[in-house]
């Protein structure tokens, strides 16, 4: 009887701890507003595709700079304090655009958003390992991605609501999105700060050179490149989906922007589904099915010029890409259990793919139209197909 009560108490305690952590995953999803925001800034300031794609590229550039140092910072101050720091920086990034949407202001906002998200993604995933162990880790990280995806698909809806309702009379318009997400950031800071979490003893002290040398392990390098391709496809679809519809159907941004919501709705559904299926299906089989969905979708985006098939293709990409990150990330962590902080920093540095892909897609679309952007994403899908064979 006492054992049963103890187990019930432990389970309740874990739920109370995991709830604020999941709210942090919601805040992690704020980074995906960059695709929606960049399209509105492009419209407001009359920018070209390559100029507008600088915004998402700038956000993910900071993952290259801050991810590995964040892994080292966690060794010094702990994972929870590092996550709290990331939330403070994220809140600051969301307050800045309230003053206006000039080019310089948005560059500053997106830079802070990228820095905050780089710190958050590096520290939040390892923090989960203090609460969830073993074979349940991939499904829990996937559920976190499901929560993150809710914030992602709400972003274009909130921006469109702000742009088409009475919000412009308050001088905000689509930027009301930043106000709402800033409020949630402050709630996340309060909730996590009040939650006690017993952390593992910090990993051994390590330098940047020692962290980067982990890339010399073939499987870690494969995982790193897999993360780059995943986020490149994610940011690329987020940014390019409305442009495909505007180019081929001539719809205005306010209507074409719903395409981004389609992608995130199905990415959210995929995360929710994966959180359960990954407990029963092998990671390799699930990963392979996901990649095949994206291969079919890329073929459709090359040839389709009517609305419904494009929506279907975006839904397939959303569902297929939804569990790629959690599977690759968990594979990397489990392959080096004694170096979780360092491996986490390296994997999140792989989100630098969100800089490389949009830049390449912007240049390709300036010369070839949006089919050029789709070609760049297809290259990323081809690599993930190769990675499927390497999953342990």
Image (spheres, rainbow, N blue to C red):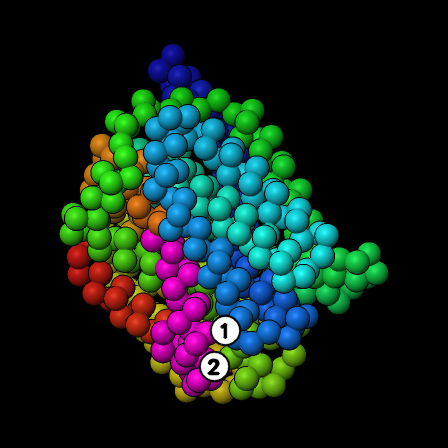
Q: Is residue 329 visible?
A: yes
* Left or right for 280, reference 154: left
Binning the other alpha carbons within 10 Å of mark 2 as few (below 14), some (14 to 19) or many (20 upward) gives some
Name the image quarter holding residue 74.
top left
Which quadrant would the N terminus be assigned to in this image? top left
Image coordinates of residue 348 in percent, x first then y, are 36, 48
Name the image quarter holding residue 121.
top left
Identify the disc placed on residue 50: 1
Count of labels shown?
2
Name the image quarter holding residue 10.
top left
Image coordinates of residue 252 in percent, x first then y, are 65, 79
Q: Is residue 6 magenta?
A: no
The part of the chain drawn in magenta is 350-376
Predominant SS of the magenta segment: helix
Q: Do the CB atoms of the residues marked 1 and 2 lie less than 8 Å apart? A: yes
- Alpha-carbon span between mark 1 and mark 2: 7 Å
Q: Residue at x 67, y 53 (%)?
A: 97
* Left or right for 184, reference 125: right
Q: Residue at x 56, y 44 (%)?
A: 90
Q: Residue at x 17, y 48 (%)?
A: 216
Look at mark 2 in the image and give the residue it sits on.
366
Q: Nearer the viewer, residue 226 or 16?
A: 226
Tell which circle, 1 or 2, labels the residue nearer the N-terminal end.
1
Q: Is residue 161 visible?
A: no
Instruction: State whether residue 81 is above or below residue 286.
Output: above
Q: Secondary structure at mark 2?
A: helix
Q: Secondary structure at mark 1?
A: helix
Image coordinates of residue 249 in percent, x first then y, are 57, 86
Image coordinates of residue 49 in percent, x first then y, are 52, 75
Instruction: State whether residue 293 is above or below residue 104.
Output: below
């Amino acid at each position: 009887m006492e054992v049963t009560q103890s187990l019930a108490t432990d389970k309740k305690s874990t739920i109370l701890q995991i709830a604020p952590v999941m709210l942090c995953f919601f805040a992690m999803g704020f980074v995906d507003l960059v695709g929606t925001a960049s399209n509105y800034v492009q419209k407001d300031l009359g920018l070209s595709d390559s100029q507008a794609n600088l915004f998402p590229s700038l956000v993910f550039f900071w993952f290259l700079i801050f991810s590995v140092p964040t892994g080292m910072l966690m060794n010094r101050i702990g994972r929870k304090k590092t996550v709290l720091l990331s939330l403070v920086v994220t809140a600051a990034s969301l307050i800045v655009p309230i003053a206006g949407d000039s080019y310089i202001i948005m560059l500053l906002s997106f830079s802070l958003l990228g820095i905050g998200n780089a710190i958050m993604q590096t520290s939040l995933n390892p923090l989960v390992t203090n609460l969830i162990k073993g074979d349940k880790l991939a499904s829990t990280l996937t559920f976190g991605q499901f929560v993150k995806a809710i914030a992602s698909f709400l972003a274009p809806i909130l921006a469109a609501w702000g742009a088409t309702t009475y919000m412009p009379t308050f001088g905000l318009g689509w930027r009301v999105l930043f106000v709402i997400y800033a409020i949630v950031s402050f709630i996340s800071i309060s909730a996590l700060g009040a939650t006690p979490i017993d952390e593992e003893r910090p990993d051994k002290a390590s330098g940047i050179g020692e962290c980067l040398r982990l890339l010399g392990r073939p499987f870690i390098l494969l995982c790193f490149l897999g993360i780059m391709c995943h986020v490149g496809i994610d940011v690329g679809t987020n940014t390019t989906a409305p442009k495909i519809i505007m180019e081929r159907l001539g719809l205005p941004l306010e209507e074409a922007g719903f395409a981004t919501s389609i992608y995130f709705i199905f990415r959210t559904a995929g995360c929710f589904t994966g959180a359960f299926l990954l407990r029963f299906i092998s990671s390799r089989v699930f990963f392979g099915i996901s990649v095949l969905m994206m291969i079919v979708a890329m073929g459709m985006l090359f040839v389709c010029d009517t609305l419904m098939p494009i929506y279907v293709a975006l839904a397939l990409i959303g569902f297929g890409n939804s569990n790629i990150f959690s599977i690759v990330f968990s594979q990397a962590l489990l392959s080096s259990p004694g170096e979780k902080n360092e491996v986490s920093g390296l994997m999140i540095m792989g989100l630098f793919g969100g800089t490389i892909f949009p830049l390449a897609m912007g240049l390709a679309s300036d010369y070839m139209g949006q089919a050029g952007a789709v070609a760049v994403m297809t290259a990323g899908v081809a690599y993930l197909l190769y990675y499927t064979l390497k999953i342990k």
